[in-house]
Image (cartoon, rainbow, N blue to C red):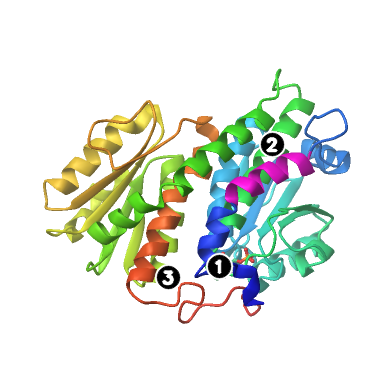
Amino acid sequence: NDLEKGTYPYYMLKEIDEQPAVMRKLVLKYQDEEGKLSIDPEIVNTMMDSDRIYIIAAGTSYHAGLVGKKLLEEMTNIPTEVHVSSEFGYHTPLLPEKPFFIFISQSGETADSRQVLVKMNELGHPSLTVTNVAGSTLSRESNFTLLLNAGPEIAVASTKAYTAQIAVLAILSEVVGMEKGLIDEPTMIHDLGIVANAMQTLVDEKDVIEELASEYLSITRNAFYIGRGMDYHVALEAALKLKEISYIQTEGFAAGELKHGTIALIEKGTPVIALVTEQAVAGHTRGNLQETRARGAHTMVISMDGLDRPGDHIVIPKVNPLLSALVSVIPTQLLSYYCSLHRGNDVDKPRNLAKSVTVE
Ligand code: G6P
């Protein structure tokens, strides 16, 4: 089994490296003979018929759902909500007449998500599972399935499944948006190709990121990721990834919310990492980062080409802003990996965690 790791010391690093290939494979898997993106028309029609989409997921898949909501609303114009599965089933919000459920689950086995599916099946609401595992419980018990085609993910900390989930939702959103006549010219095949190249550039910059991990994260007991909009969603995932495998207490924060209380935690040397990929809020996020620096924080900036400023630590190549999460998450995955490695942790099997949680 360990042979599959090849020359990699840990599965996590291998899986981080596989992401550009996963993007390219997905684009091929979801293309028809004419080279257009295509999704089972039954899925598309059921979605078009619904008045609200509910994304249900846990952990990293929930974070992919937050990005997915943005993609679905932008491209399909269908209001979309994202919920943590352990909360939704027993505290179900008031549902509209025609809800459509999207379950996001790498394993397709998460018990918290399944209990929601069982209840929604009883109510007769249609559902789609986005999963890496064909024939998994969630896949079998929902009406429709879209596969991630990411290959087995072995490391407990999810990386390639997160980016594949977002990419599948981007493809789905464009196909539905086209069908609804909201999009004139499809760009997703091209855009995901650009994303794959951008990911490749970043995974080739491991030395730089390993250095930054040493400089920022080697001795600290806590850390913050901040951002706004899509960058906030990535900050949540980046923080989860770092805490899971390094055991550093890390919080992902909406950059503008930090000053309303949590900034009290900033001390001399506290690492605060800002994600800056959206033009409209770039200046605000930088301002918020400056506020933490003035209180002694050790600040780092991950920005997108075009919005970068001298002194930024990591500049990700320019991609469709709707897809920025797919690229900005890569350096945060690598920061977590090297931080965990340097601390001598078992990167692939962090303490107290399971790859798939089959109890509620
Ligand atoms: C566990 C894993 C996480 C994962 C979550 C949801 O907690 O450790 O990495 O994100 O379950 O898993 P799923 O298979 O439903 O995506």
Q: Is residue 158 above or below residue 28?
A: below
CB at disc 1 and ligand 1 closer than 8 Å: no
Please say whether residue 162 is visible from this viewpoint: yes
CB at disc 2 and ligand 1 closer than 8 Å: no
Q: For the N terminus, which image quadrant?
A: bottom right
Instruction: Give the amino acid at mark 1.
Output: Tyr
Q: Earlier in the sequence, mark 3 or mark 1?
A: 1
Q: For mark 1, what is the residue?
A: 11
Instruction: Give the amino acid at mark 2.
Output: Ser
> Marks 3 and 2, how far apart in space?
32 Å
Q: For mark 2, what is the residue?
A: 173
Q: For mark 3, what is the residue?
A: 245
Residue 280 on image: x %, y %: 38, 27
What crowding class fits label 1: few (fewer than 14 Cα within 10 Å), some (14-19), or many (20 or more)?
A: many
Instruction: Give the amino acid at mark 3.
Output: Ile
Magenta region includes residue 24: yes
Which of pointers 3 and 1 indicates the residue nearer the eye?
A: 1
What crowding class fits label 2: few (fewer than 14 Cα within 10 Å), some (14-19), or many (20 or more)?
A: many
Residue plotted at (63% across, 50% down): 164
What crowding class fits label 3: few (fewer than 14 Cα within 10 Å), some (14-19), or many (20 or more)?
A: many
Residue 87 on image: x %, y %: 57, 65
| Residue 77 picture quarter | top right
Which of pointers 1 and 2 indicates the residue nearer the eye?
A: 1
Please say whether residue 51 is visible from this viewpoint: no
> Marks 1 and 2, how far apart in space?
31 Å
Seen from the viewer's position, the closer of residues 327 and 359 is 327
Is label 3 in a helix, a strand or a loop?
A: helix
Q: Give the residues in magenta.
A: 19-30
| Residue 34 picture quarter | top right
Residue plotted at (26% across, 37% down): 286
Q: Earlier in the sequence, mark 1 or mark 2?
A: 1
Q: For ligand 1, give the image quadrant.
A: bottom right
